[in-house]
């Protein structure tokens, strides 16, 4: 095994173990902020030591032990500080390091779903809870979370830091919620899973177009939430949306990892079983009556997946569904997709006029997707020079290497065609 392969394998393992270890440490020490810091230190220690010494036989137990030692060191420092400040030996706290077997058992439990609901804490605003959970459960970096929220990285860093402080100062226990609390936190939980899946399906930065580990983990957690709440239509809708979207993953990249757009994909590579499950879920959830945003997005994905060829896509139906979705959710990406659906159903000029209305949305300023959609619609309309400029502008704005290559290649092909 090469060093590079070992590093990648270790990285994947650490990402998988991180939320489980954090859950074990928080459950034992009841301090999320300090627990996350301790787990981050343990992960860094593993990243330094494991490539040389090898992955331990029980990596989860190893991480929990290291993180717990960090927590205990912190407690001892805090006790010493209090003793110095109060000069009172009565303030001493007995610190007992738990047996290794106990820690191994903690690490072996998969409490990721509990951690997911725990992070959507009542002391936090919805946006702060989502950001914190993306860090703790999804394993996303601050930069990736900032990209998902369309805000600067520094702003997101401050938001996550304030979230930890709010939990610590609230006095509300950081523990698994009861049934009533779960219902109150469900909306944030679903949003978190949606964002984790999106980052996995289309990575916002880096050399790879997709991060299958994140997408599959989001699907796993969505299944767990549905098992907990089998009659919730939006839970079923979100799971259906993930399955219907992830079904296309095998066809989204070429042999060299290059991006293949939806219209050019080999639909024979799509996962038929995932599509069938997703369609069944969305049909059953829509039949219940009340319809939410995830159900509508799943319905749109189903229309795409059920078309045997790109030219068979029922764009008028997709346009109607986006119209409903836009009235239900103030989301700039929904409005952007609505403009695409308009262009496909009624012509590129109609789509471009709708796109012009989005120029003033501050959430989209500087986002590569807006420039990329404009380039595509300009190309459809035959405005070659403007399309070339828009493709190049979009490429300059994205941090995803495969997307950047795709956009620059589109611009190059159009430029070459203009010389003929």
Image: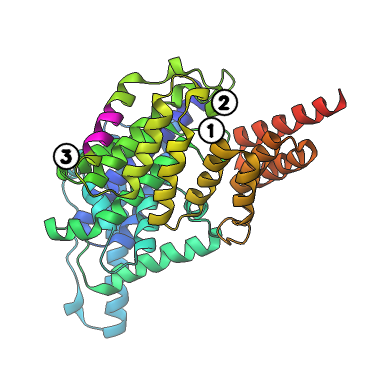
| Above or below 59: residue 95 | below
Marks 2 and 3 close (CB-CB < 8 Å): no
**Residue 95: image location, x then y, percent:** 19, 61
**Would you say 316 lies left or right of 86 here?**
right
SS at badge 1: loop
Of circles 1 and 3, which is in front?
Answer: 3
User: In terms of secondary structure, what is the magenta stretch mainly?
Assistant: helix
What residue did someone put label 1 on? 209
**Residue 306: image location, x then y, percent:** 39, 25
Please identify the quadrant where the C terminus is shown.
top right
**Residue 182: image location, x then y, percent:** 18, 56
Whether residue 252 appears in this view of the structure is: yes
User: Could you tell which of marks 2 and 1 lies nearer the N-terminus?
Assistant: 1
What is the residue that sits farthest to the top in this orientation?
268
Of circles 2 and 1, which is in front?
Answer: 2
Q: Indicate whether residue 282 is drawn in magenta.
A: yes
| Above or below 155: residue 52 | above
What is the residue that sits farthest to the left in this orientation?
179
Res 260 label: 2
Q: Indicate whether residue 416 is drawn in magenta.
A: no
User: Could you tell which of marks 2 and 3 lies nearer the N-terminus?
Assistant: 3
What residue did someone put label 3 on? 227
**Would you say 397 lies left or right of 119 here?**
right
**Would you say 337 lies left or right of 274 here?**
right
SS at badge 2: loop
Magenta segment: 277-284
**Would you say 398 lies left or right of 230 here?**
right
């Amino acid at each position: 095994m090469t060093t590079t392969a070992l590093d990648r394998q270790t990285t994947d393992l650490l990402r998988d173990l991180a939320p489980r270890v954090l859950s074990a440490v928080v459950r034992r020490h009841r301090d999320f902020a300090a627990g996350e810091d301790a787990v981050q230190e343990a992960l860094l220690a593993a990243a330094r030591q494991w490539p040389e010494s090898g992955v331990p036989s029980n990596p989860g137990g190893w991480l929990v032990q290291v993180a717990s030692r960090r927590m205990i060191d912190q407690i001892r420092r805090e006790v010493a500080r209090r003793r110095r400040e109060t000069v009172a030996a009565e303030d001493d706290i007995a610190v007992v390091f738990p047996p290794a077997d106990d820690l191994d058992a903690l690490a072996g439990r998969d409490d990721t779903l509990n951690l997911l609901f725990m992070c959507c804490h009542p002391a936090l605003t919805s946006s702060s809870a989502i950001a914190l959970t993306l860090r703790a459960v999804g394993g996303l970096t601050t930069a990736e979370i900032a990209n998902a929220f369309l805000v600067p990285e520094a702003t997101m860093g401050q938001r996550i830091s304030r979230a930890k402080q709010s939990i610590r100062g609230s006095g509300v226990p950081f523990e698994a919620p009861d049934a009533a609390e779960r219902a109150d936190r469900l909306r944030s939980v679903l949003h978190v899973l949606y964002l984790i899946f999106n980052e996995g399906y289309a990575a916002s930065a880096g050399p790879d177009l997709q991060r299958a580990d994140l997408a599959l983990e989001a699907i796993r957690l969505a299944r767990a939430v549905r098992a907990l709440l089998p009659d919730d239509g939006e839970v079923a809708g979100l799971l259906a949306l993930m399955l219907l979207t992830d079904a296309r993953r095998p066809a989204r990249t070429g042999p060299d990892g290059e991006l293949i757009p939806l219209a050019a994909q080999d639909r024979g590579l799509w996962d038929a079983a995932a599509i069938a499950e997703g369609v069944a879920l969305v049909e059953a959830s829509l039949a219940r009556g009340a319809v939410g945003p995830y159900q509508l997005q799943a319905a749109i994905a189903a229309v795409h997946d059920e078309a045997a060829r790109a030219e068979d896509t029922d764009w008028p139906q997709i346009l109607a569904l986006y119209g409903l979705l836009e009235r239900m959710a103030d989301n700039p990406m929904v409005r952007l997709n609505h403009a695409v659906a308009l262009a496909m159903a009624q012509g590129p000029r109609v789509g471009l006029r709708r796109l012009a209305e989005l120029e003033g949305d501050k959430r989209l300023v500087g986002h590569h997707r807006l420039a990329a959609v404009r380039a595509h619609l300009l190309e459809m309309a035959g405005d070659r020079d403007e399309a070339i400029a828009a493709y190049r502008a979009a490429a300059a704005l994205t941090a995803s290497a495969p997307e950047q290559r795709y956009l620059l290649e589109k611009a190059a092909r159009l430029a070459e065609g203009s010389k003929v």
